[in-house]
Amino acid sequence: MTEEILSALACPVCGGGFALSENKKSLVCEKRHCFDIASSGYVNFCGSHGGDSKELVRARREFLSLGYYRPIADAAVELLGKYAPEGVVADLGCGEGYYGDIIARAGYKLCGFDLSKPAVEAAAKRKNPSAFFAVGGVFELPLKDESCAALTNIFAPCAEKEYTRVLKKGGCLIVIGAGEEHLLGLKRAIYDEPSLNTERADLPHELRRVETRRVKYDIDLKSNGEITQLFSMTPYFYRTDERGFARLAALDRLTTEIDVLCDVYIKD
Ligand SMILES: C[S@@+](CC[C@H](N)C(=O)[O-])C[C@H]1O[C@@H](n2cnc3c(N)ncnc32)[C@H](O)[C@@H]1O
Ligand SMILES: [Zn+2]
C-alpha cells in the first residue's frame, strides 16, 4: 500500500488515522483498533457478507477481460486527466477492480471499496502496486474528510453525502451509469417489448455538474458464453423469466448497444 493511500484511510470505528503494524500484516489506528491485511493485500473494514457473489464476480471478470468495456475505462481516465490530473482516486463500488486497475496504471494512487468480499479479493489479486482494495460500504467510507482528489463511481450505488465528505475542495466525482439505450440489443433478445432505460434516481444534486460525456458504440458478442457472461452481470439476470433465458440460450452471436453517461461533478 502506498503512503498516500495509507494516509487517506480512516479507522471505521473511531475515525483516526492508520499506521502499518510492525510486522506489516495489519493496519492499527491511533486508538489501537486493528484490521488485518489479507495475504492478497486487501483489508476487510466492515465484515460484510453482502454485495456481488463469487459467481457473479467471476462472470464480470471474464467478460471485462475481453475488452468490450475498455472505451468506458478510457473515458474515465480521460476525464480524470482533465479534472484531477494527480492524487488519490477512490473507486466506489469497485467490483473486481477492472476500472481501478486501469486508473492506477494511468498514474494515480487508487483505493477501491466494495461490499463484496469475493470482488475485493479478486481486485487485490491483480497485484497492482499503485492500487489498494478494501471491503467497505460506500455509505460509510473508511476515508478521512477531504482525502481524495477524485472519486469514480461506475455502475454502482451513488452516496452523494459521503462522497462530498471525502472529496477535497475542487476535486471531482465521476459517476458512470447506463444511458437510455445501454444494452438495448441484449434486451431485444430477451423481451418482446424492451423499454429504454430511464434516468437513475441517485444522481448527485448538491455537487456542481460540469460535464456529461456520452460513450456510445456497438459490441458484437461472438459466442453464447460471452452473451451469458454479459447477461449475468446485468440487473435483467434477476428479472428474466424462463422464456427469456431460453431465448438467450439459443443465441451464439449478439450485437448490442453500449450507451453510458459519464457525469462529472466538482466540489466547490
Ligand atoms: C454492477 S457492479 C459494478 C462493479 C464495478 N464498478 C464494475 O463496473 O465492474 C456494482 C457493485 O457495487 C457493489 N455494491 C453494491 N452496494 C454497495 C454498497 N452499499 N457499498 C459498496 N459497494 C456496493 C456490488 O458489490 C458490486 O460489486
Ligand atoms: Zn480506531
Image: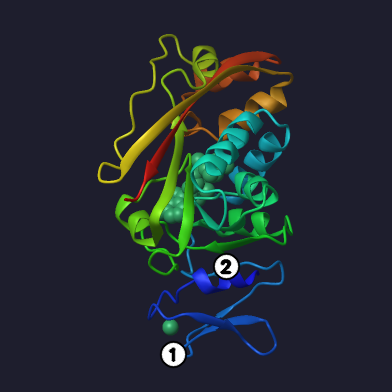
Q: Above or below — where is 214 with respect to 81?
A: above
Relative horizontal placement of residue 84, taking residue 69 as reference (left or right): left
Q: Label 2 is placed on what type of residue? A: Ile
- Report the residue at 65% width, 55% height from top: 123
Q: Above or below — where is 49 with respect to 173?
A: below
Which residue is nearer to you in this view: 182 or 10?
10
Residue lying at the far left of the rendered structure:
206
Which residue is nearer to you in this view: 207 or 143?
207
Q: Is mark 1 within 8 Å of ligand 2?
A: yes
- Report the residue at 48% width, 69% height from top: 47
- Report the residue at 67% width, 90% height from top: 22
x then y, percent, for residue 53: 56, 50
Helix, strand or loop under label 2: helix
Q: Above or below — where is 202 with respect to 139?
A: above
Residue 5, disc? 2
Q: Quadrant of ligand 2?
A: bottom left
Going from N to C along the chain, the mark reached first, 1 or 2, is 2
Q: Is mark 2 within 8 Å of ligand 2?
A: no
Relative horizontal placement of residue 51, taking residue 158 as reference (left or right): right
The residue carrying mark 1 is 31
CA distance separating discs 1 and 2: 19 Å
Q: Quadrant of residue 78?
A: top right
x then y, percent, for residue 153: 47, 45
Mark 1 vs mark 2: in front: 2
